[in-house]
C-alpha cells in the first residue's frame, strides 16, 4: 500500500473480531432464519453446521494463508504468489468484481435496515395490522428517493470507517460493534424465550426431523455456509494480509466460524420462538424480517422497544459486512493503482452507489426492466452467489491445493514450524478433493436450477 508499511491488526482479538464482523452480516440474521424456516428447521441447522466445520473453516484458512503469505490485497496476492501469471491475477480481479457486485445489491438491503431503525424509533410501525405492515414495506421498497437516500447513507457510513484505516477504522470499530451485536442479540433472546409458546420455536430450531433432509436441504445448507462465511470474494484474503505473523491461523479461523455460526443460531433463537408464539409462518421467506417480525413486535408488550433493538442489531451486522466488502475494493485501489486511502474510499463508494442505483430501483421504477428474465437486483444476487463466489473459491482451491508449494502453506499454518501441523494432511484432503467437489455441486445446481 501507499501507506504500506503494511499496517495490520494490532492483536489476535482485533483480527478475530474484524474478520468475524466481515463474515457476520445480513446473511446471518436476515437470510439464515428464512432459509432455515423454508428447509425444515433443525434438519437444515444440523447440515449447515456440518458444512461449516468440514469445508467452511478449511477454506477460510486457505484465504488467510494466501493473504498473510502475500501481505497484499486480493489482486496483488495472486499476482505475487502466482509468479505474476495473468491467470492467477485474474482470480484476484474476480474477487474485486464479486465485492463490487455484492456490495451494490447488499447495500440496498442494508439501507432497508437503516430505514426500519428510523421507523421503529418513530413508532411508525406500532399498532399497524398485518396488511398495513406489508404496505409500509411495499411502499418504501417500491419508491425511489428514500430507498436511494438510505442506501447512500449506509455507503457513506461504511466509507467513513474505511477512510480511517485498518487499525483506527476497521479494527477499532469491530471491537466496539461486535460486542454490542452480541449483547443486543442476547437481550432479544431473553425476551423471545419468555414469550408464551416459545418452546415450539425452540423445538423447530433445535430438534431435527431427519426425514426432512433431502437434496434441496443439503444444497441450501451448503450454499448458506459459503455465503455466511464470505468465502470466495477476497474478503478473508484481504483481512488475512493484516493478520500478524505470530497469530495462529487455524485458531483464528475456528473462532471466526464459531462467532459467525453463533450469531446465526442466536438470530434463530430470537426469531422462531416469537414467530411460533404469535402463530406466524416460519417459512415466510425474505419478508420474514421486514413484514412478519414487525407484526410479532406489535403483538408483544414493549414491542416498539424490541423492534428498535432488533433492527439496530441488524444494521450493525450489515455494517460490519459492508466494511469488509469496501475494504476489498479500496485495498486494491490503494496498492495496485496507488491511490490515497481517502481518495480510494470516496471514489469506490461513489462507484458502488452508481452501480447500486439500478439494484435499488429494481423494486420500484425499474421493476419491469429485466436482463435474462431477472431484475438487476436478482441478477446480481444470482451471479455472485451461484457463480462468481463458487468459481472464485474453486479456483482458489486449485491454486493453493495443486499449484502452490506445500512447504510454504505449511510454513504459514505452523508459523514457521513453531506450531504442530498434524492436521495438515486432513486439510489438504479437504482442499484438494472435498471442497472442490462441494463447490462444483453448487455451480452445477446454479446452472441447472
Image (spheres, rainbow, N blue to C red):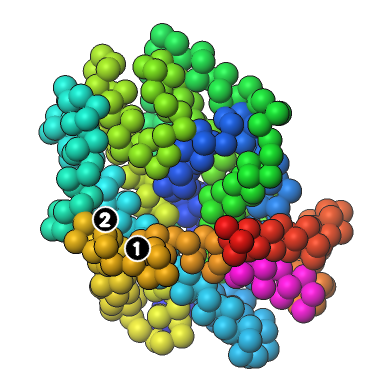
**Label 1 vs label 2: CA separation?**
8 Å
Q: Please give the label number shown on residue 375.
A: 1
Mark 2: few/some/many CA within 10 Å (<14, 14-19, 20+)? many
Q: Quadrant of the N terminus?
A: bottom left
Give the mark, 1 or 2, whose residue is nearer the N terminus: 2
Using residue 333 as the reference point, say whether residue 252 is left or right of it.
right
Q: Is residue 35 magenta?
A: no
Contact between labelled residues 2 and 1, with CB atoms less than 8 Å apart:
yes
Q: Quadrant of residue 204?
A: top right
Q: Quadrant of the C terminus?
A: bottom right
Callout 2: SS: helix
What residue span does the magenta drawing correspond to?
Answer: 390-403
Q: Is residue 396 magenta?
A: yes
Q: Where's residue 26, x and y in %?
A: 42, 47
Q: What residue is shown at x 22% (from left), y 44% (from top)?
A: 138
Callout 1: SS: loop
Q: Quadrant of residue 135?
A: top left
The answer to whether 52 is drawn above or below residue 426 in the figure is above
Q: Where's residue 140, x and y in %?
A: 18, 47
Of residue 49 and residue 317, the one placed in the foreground of this image is 49
Q: Where's residue 253, x and y in %?
A: 64, 52
Q: What residue is shown at x 33% (from left), y 81% (from top)?
A: 340
Residue position marked by numbered label 2 in the rendering: 363
- Judge whether residue 7 can be spotted in this image: no
Using residue 164 as the reference point, say whether residue 3 is left or right of it.
right
Q: Please give the label number shown on residue 66.
A: none
The answer to whether 74 is drawn above or below residue 362 in the figure is below
Q: What residue is shown at x 42% (from left), y 26% (from top)?
A: 281
Amino acid at each position: 500500500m501507499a501507506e504500506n508499511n503494511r499496517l495490520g491488526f494490532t492483536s489476535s482479538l482485533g483480527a478475530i473480531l474484524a474478520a468475524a464482523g466481515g463474515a457476520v452480516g445480513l446473511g446471518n440474521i436476515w437470510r439464515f432464519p428464512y432459509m432455515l424456516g423454508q428447509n425444515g428447521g433443525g434438519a437444515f441447522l444440523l447440515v449447515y453446521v456440518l458444512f461449516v466445520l468440514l469445508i467452511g473453516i478449511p477454506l477460510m484458512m486457505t484465504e488467510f494463508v494466501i493473504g498473510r503469505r502475500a501481505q497484499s490485497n486480493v489482486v496483488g496476492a495472486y499476482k505475487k504468489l502466482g509468479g505474476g501469471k495473468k491467470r492467477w491475477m485474474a482470480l484476484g480481479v474476480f474477487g474485486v468484481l464479486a465485492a463490487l457486485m455484492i456490495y451494490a445489491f447488499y447495500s440496498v438491503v442494508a439501507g432497508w435496515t437503516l430505514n426500519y431503525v428510523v421507523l421503529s424509533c418513530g413508532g411508525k410501525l406500532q399498532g399497524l395490522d398485518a396488511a398495513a405492515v406489508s404496505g409500509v414495506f411495499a411502499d418504501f421498497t417500491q419508491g425511489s428517493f428514500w430507498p436511494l437516500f438510505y442506501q447512500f447513507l449506509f455507503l457513506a457510513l461504511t466509507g467513513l470507517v474505511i477512510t480511517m484505516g485498518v487499525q483506527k477504522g476497521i479494527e477499532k470499530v469491530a471491537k466496539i460493534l461486535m460486542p454490542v451485536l452480541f449483547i443486543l442479540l442476547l437481550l432479544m433472546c431473553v425476551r423471545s424465550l419468555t414469550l408464551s409458546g416459545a418452546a415450539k420455536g425452540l423445538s423447530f430450531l433445535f430438534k431435527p426431523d431427519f426425514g426432512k433432509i433431502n437434496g434441496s436441504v443439503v444444497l441450501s445448507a451448503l450454499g448458506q455456509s459459503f455465503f455466511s462465511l464470505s468465502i470466495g470474494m477476497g474478503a478473508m484474503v484481504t483481512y488475512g494480509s493484516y493478520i500478524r505473523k505470530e497469530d495462529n491461523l487455524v485458531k483464528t479461523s475456528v473462532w471466526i466460524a464459531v462467532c459467525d455460526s453463533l450469531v446465526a443460531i442466536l438470530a434463530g433463537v430470537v426469531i422462531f420462538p416469537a414467530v411460533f408464539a404469535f402463530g406466524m409462518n416460519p417459512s415466510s421467506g425474505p419478508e420474514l424480517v421486514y413484514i412478519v417480525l414487525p407484526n410479532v413486535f406489535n403483538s408483544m408488550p414493549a414491542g416498539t422497544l424490541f423492534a428498535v433493538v432488533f433492527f439496530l442489531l441488524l444494521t450493525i451486522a450489515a455494517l460490519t459486512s459492508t466494511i469488509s466488502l469496501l475494504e476489498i475494493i479500496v485495498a486494491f485501489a490503494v496498492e495496485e493503482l496507488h491511490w490515497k486511502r481517502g481518495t480510494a474510499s470516496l471514489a469506490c463508494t461513489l462507484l458502488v452507489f452508481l452501480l447500486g442505483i439500478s439494484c435499488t430501483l429494481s423494486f420500484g421504477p425499474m421493476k419491469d426492466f429485466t436482463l435474462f428474465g431477472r431484475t438487476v437486483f436478482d441478477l446480481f444476487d444470482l451471479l455472485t452467489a451461484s457463480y462468481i463466489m463458487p468459481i472464485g473459491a474453486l479456483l482458489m482451491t486449485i491454486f493453493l491445493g495443486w499449484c502452490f508449494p506445500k512447504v510454504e502453506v505449511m510454513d504459514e499454518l505452523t508459523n514457521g514450524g513453531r506450531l504442530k501441523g498434524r492436521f495438515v494432511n486432513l486439510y489438504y484432503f479437504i482442499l484438494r478433493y472435498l471442497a472442490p467437489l462441494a463447490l462444483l455441486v453448487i455451480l452445477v445446481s446454479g446452472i441447472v436450477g
